Amino acid sequence: MTTVRLTCAFEYLRQELNDVVRLFLGDVPISESEGALHITHTHEAAGGVWIERVTDGKSVYARKTPAARGELEEKRAVKRAAKTALFLLMRDRSGINPPWGSLTGIRPTRLMYEAMEAGLSAGEAEARMREEFYVSAEKASLLREIIEMQRGLIDPPENTFDLYIGIPFCVTRCAYCSFSSGEIGNGRLTEPYTDALIREIRGSAEIMREKGLSLRAAYVGGGTPTALSCTQLGRILDAAMECFPNAAEWTVEAGRPDTIDREKLLMLKTRGVGRISVNPQTFSDATLKLIGRAHTSGDTLRAYGLARETGFDHINMDIIAALPGEDMDMFTRTLDRVTELAPESVTVHSLAIKRSSKLHEALTVAGDSHNQADAAYAADMISAARGTLESGGWRPYYLYRQKYMAGNLENVGYAKPGYACLYNIGNMEETACVLAVGAGSISKWLFPREKRIERAANLKNIEEYISRADEMIARKRELILKD
Ligand code: SF4
């Protein structure tokens, strides 16, 4: 494995430049003091212009930028120029063209919106993504389609917030999982957790009342919310809906098909939950076993059929590209099954193998990793998904990227017209304030006047959360009522 020594002129650039190196070399060790490949960044100011230079000892790449004013602007300009110079160096050394070009952040749509706020048309902004950031034509057009789908949905009405309720239990742990969710085991924590969560919901509702805000969209995720008993989940929803009435949207992740039965579906339906997720991930039983999901594709079909019978008219399905051992034929079969079932929305994930997952451990022990061949494979699968879904009438409406994602790709939510999930857009584009309750959840509050976002994180450990729910309310009070 290559090791990299990275010397840079400003400490605040280090992480950004590390991320660019990893676009090309994967999750390699990078340090300031040693490494087989030595990359050096220098900064020079000359006649109102800054020059960011990057060299590997053989080639030198430089980008100029006008000297900016104000600390934030300065850092931003230097960051962009240095990242671009390093991107070009690595691209030419490796011959690899990453699909998202020099972009390493989570939300590429943000740059499109920025360009449009500065007066560019959507078409001009798309061209800018290609020319300035080396984003591929395919990904730039994806961004443009997403922005078109978000029109009219991106800005929530004034004095509203969105709600996230976290249920951190799953029946078994998936091999690729990096969430703090725990296996439900004998269920001894579910009842005290339900009580603590309801306490936090009621305490948070007081804060929202004081602030004069009402709920727009709610999302119950996890974990697997339907891993709780019907009574427990019903109690949580009753408390939340009583505290926050008249929301425009309620989503409940019923992600693992083996946790869904008629009783739970009816309970959700009668409470007015409009959108649920039934997640196959793949329709290959062998892969499901390999990745530690305790259900079969038959369970997915049964759960989906039951949800339709119960009257759900907005079902989302999640699938994952580039799962271990899957080839294009297997992925195509999954796509075909999904399009036959015709859920109203489909989320296509690229496998992200984070360090905290069992799969990362297994691949590290086996000396394997997601290499460039895997990356090309993943890219083909993601393109195939887009082609199949778009020709079936689904449109991309939100996107996010994660670190350690196969091929540096993206997760994309597709929906039939009229079925985009408001919560997903507001959360991903960071246009909605999110009040988050439950262990491990993170509230995110926007302060538009100062153009600032602040966060308050809840404790991840379930037992600690249960005993300290009041403290979680206090953290939110401090965050939300501070201005
Ligand atoms: S269902 Fe989701 S949260 Fe639960 S173990 Fe699998 S990936 Fe993790």
Image: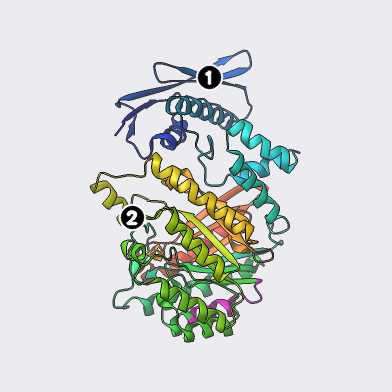
- What is the crowding at mark 2: few (fewer than 14 residues within 10 Å), some, or many (at least 20)? some
Cα distance, mark 2 to mark 1? 38 Å
Count of marks, rendered view: 2
> Circle 2 — which element?
loop
- Dot 1 falls on a residue whose secondary structure is strand
Please rate how many residues cluster around mark 1, counting C-alpha atoms within 10 Å: few if below 14, some from 14 to 19, many from 20.
Answer: some
Does residue 375 appear to the left or right of 452 in the view shown? left
Residue highlighted by disc 2? 357
Residue 132 % position (x, y): 61, 31
Q: What type is the residue that disc 2 sits on?
A: Ser
Nearer to the camera, 122 or 214: 122
Magenta region includes residue 246: yes
Q: Are marks 2 and 1 in contact (CB under 8 Å)?
A: no
The furthest residue to the top: 47
Indicate the quadrant where residue 285 lies.
bottom left
User: Residue 307 location in percent, x, y?
Assistant: 53, 79
Who's the residue at 62% across and 67% down the image?
217
- Position above or below: 185 against 420: below
Comparing 337 with 94, the one in front is 337
Whether 407 is drawn above or below 474: the answer is above
Q: Which residue is mark 1?
A: 62
Q: Which residues are magenta?
A: 234-248
Q: Is residue 367 visible?
A: yes
Residue 478 locus on image (x, y percent): 53, 59
Q: How does the figure colour the protein chain or chains?
A: rainbow
Magenta stretch prevailing secondary structure = helix
The residue closer to the viewer here, 471 or 445, is 445
Q: Quadrant of the C terminus?
A: bottom right
Residue 451 can be seen in this image: no
Q: In which quadrant of this rendering is ligand 1 seen?
A: bottom left
Q: Amino acid at mark 1?
A: Ala
Compare marks 2 and 1 and give the one earlier in the sequence: 1
